[in-house]
Amino acid sequence: MLQMLKRVISVDEARIISQIGTVEAQYRTAVLNAVAAAKRAPGTLKQLAAMIESGRVEEALDAAARAGAIRIADQYAAVFVTAGQEAAEGLTDILDVTVGFDQVNERAVAHMQHERLRLIREFADEQKQATRLALSDGIQRGANPIEQARAFRGSIGLTSRQQQSVLNFRRYLEQAASGDTSALSRTLRDRRFDPTIRRALRTGEPLSAEQIERMTARYRERYVKYRSEVIARTEALRAVHVGQDEAMHQAVDDGLIDRESMERTWITSRDGRERESHALLNGQKRGLDETFPGLAGELRYPGDPNAPAAETIQCRCGLAIRIKSLKRD
């Protein structure tokens, strides 16, 4: 007969925090690699220009968006499985019995398939909007096919809003000689170019086309890097917590842990940048299947894929897991 041991054991929260930091860095690299793959997908610059000139823009868009999206989705699945396996290893240490993580478990497979479709759809939709915006701007400026192809490639990795910010930055640079100081207010600008911009403001001499292109390209690169960090932080934390949650539920399903013995404590990064709702959650405790109250909706854990985006984007919170009693034969 199973007997309950009267003791409390914590799953090492430092281990989870370290894991999130590691996979976030890996995810960031994966996103940048996905962007690079998307840029290559339609072919060389000359081939891309030919596709644009012949009206095959949608074909080029589909190739680029899918190449990037699939790599991001694959990375999510890899993090999810790794997180589940590491959580199972932690439980093995606690329970003194081997705990496995079944990645072909029906629930785990359904989650990975759902998230794969979501990530592919989101990346593809955002990318197509951004690229169409870049091409539209090129047409308005009378760009030739090669210039259009460069604009197409340059938009890869950005959302439409971010692409519009890049176009705005270019316009600010073009207007600097007339006294427009807006370019100097952009956070992601490369400040090494500031003296050149200030000189144009002071003398009224326009920046050259080459200078504008170089400054805009650098601004665009920094935006792509910034977006990769946002995606990595959001998706890595989500995958880690979902994988951890799945491992816990599998252990319960296998009869290794009593559901009622699980206690989860919300840990908020207190550095002045946390959400108000998450600051209020810090230290709150819930059972395995209980939710935490956010201002925009309920969350099962940080990064909950079913929670509103307002509660999950760039979340840096974690969970401390306690097993208040163990089962023993």
Image: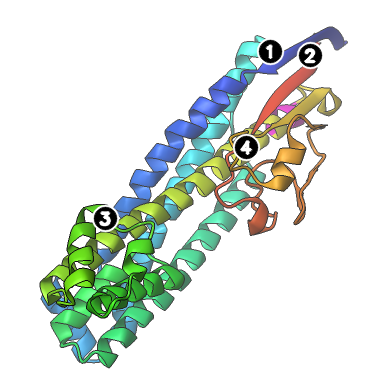
What crowding class fits label 2: few (fewer than 14 Cα within 10 Å), some (14-19), or many (20 or more)?
A: many
Query: Cβ–Cβ below 8 Å for labels 3 and 4?
Result: no
> Image check: 182 left or right of 87?
left
Taking the magenta stretch, the answer to whether it contains residue 203 is: no
Q: Residue 190 bears which disc, if any? A: 3
Secondary structure at numbered mark 3: loop
Specify whether residue 252 is painted magenta. Answer: yes
Q: Do the residues labelled 4 and 2 touch (CB within 8 Å)?
A: no
Q: Is residue 43 visible?
A: no
Quadrant for residue 160, please give it. Answer: bottom left
Q: Where is 210 relative to 31, above or below?
A: below
What's the coloring here?
A: rainbow
Magenta span of residues: 250-254
Q: Name the residue under label 4.
A: 317
Which of 165/125 is in front? 165
Q: Is mark 1 in CB contact (under 8 Å) with mark 2?
A: yes
Query: Depth-wise, is mark 4 or mark 2 nearer the camera?
Result: 4
Q: Mark 1 points at which residue?
A: 95
**SS class, disc 2:** strand
